Image: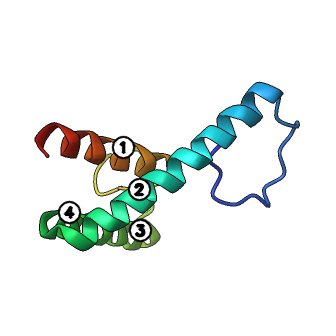
Amino acid sequence: TLLEENNKVASPSPLSPREQKAKAILSVAERNLLLWSNHHRQTNEAARKREERLSVKEFISKEVIKTDNNDGRDDGVGLSFQRTRGHKIVDYALDLYGYTLTG
C-alpha cells in the first residue's frame, strides 16, 4: 500500500505518477497531522489520556495475538486491535476535525 510501514518491502511494480502524487500528499498530511496531534496531547489532558488508552489497548492486543492462535487477525474482531499508519492518520484527522467544531 501507499502507507507501508517499511519501505524495504519490495514493490511488485513501480508506482504510477498518480500513486506517487497520492503518496506525497499522504506523507505531508501525515506529518502535519502528527505535529498537531503531538501539540494537542501536550496541551490537552483528555487528548493525552485518550492516546494512553489507545496505546495500552494496542499493546495488550499485540501481546494477546502473540499467545493466541487467531491466524493473525487484525480486523478488530475479539481482542485484536491495531493502529497502522493509515489508522493513525484517520484518527488524527478526525480528532482535529472534532477540535475545530468544538474549539
The amino acid type found where label 2 is placed reads: Gln
Q: In the displayed structure, does residue 16 sit left or right of residue 24?
A: right
Q: Secondary structure at mark 4?
A: helix
User: x, y percentage for residue 21?
Assistant: 72, 33
Which numbered disc, 4 or 1, marks the residue that appears first in the sequence?
4
Give the foreground label among 2 and 3: 2
The amino acid type found where label 3 is placed reads: Lys
Q: Which mark is residue 82?
A: 2
Which numbered disc, 4 or 2, marks the residue that appears first in the sequence?
4
Cα separation between marks 2 and 3? 8 Å
Q: Between residue 60 and residue 47, name the one nearer to us.
A: 47
Cα separation between marks 4 and 3? 23 Å
Whether residue 73 is visible here, answered yes or no, is: no
Q: Between residue 91 and residue 44, name the one nearer to us.
A: 44
Q: Are marks 2 and 3 in contact (CB under 8 Å)?
A: no
Q: Are marks 4 and 1 in contact (CB under 8 Å)?
A: no
Which numbered disc, 3 or 1, marks the residue that appears first in the sequence?
3
The amino acid type found where label 4 is placed reads: Ala
Give the foreground label among 3 and 1: 1
Give the foreground label among 2 and 1: 1
> Dot 4, crowdedness within 10 Å: few (<14), some or many (≥20)?
some
Q: Which residue is mark 1?
A: 93
Q: Which residue is mark 4?
A: 47
Residue at the location (86% across, 40% down)? 12
Which numbered disc, 2 or 3, marks the residue that appears first in the sequence?
3
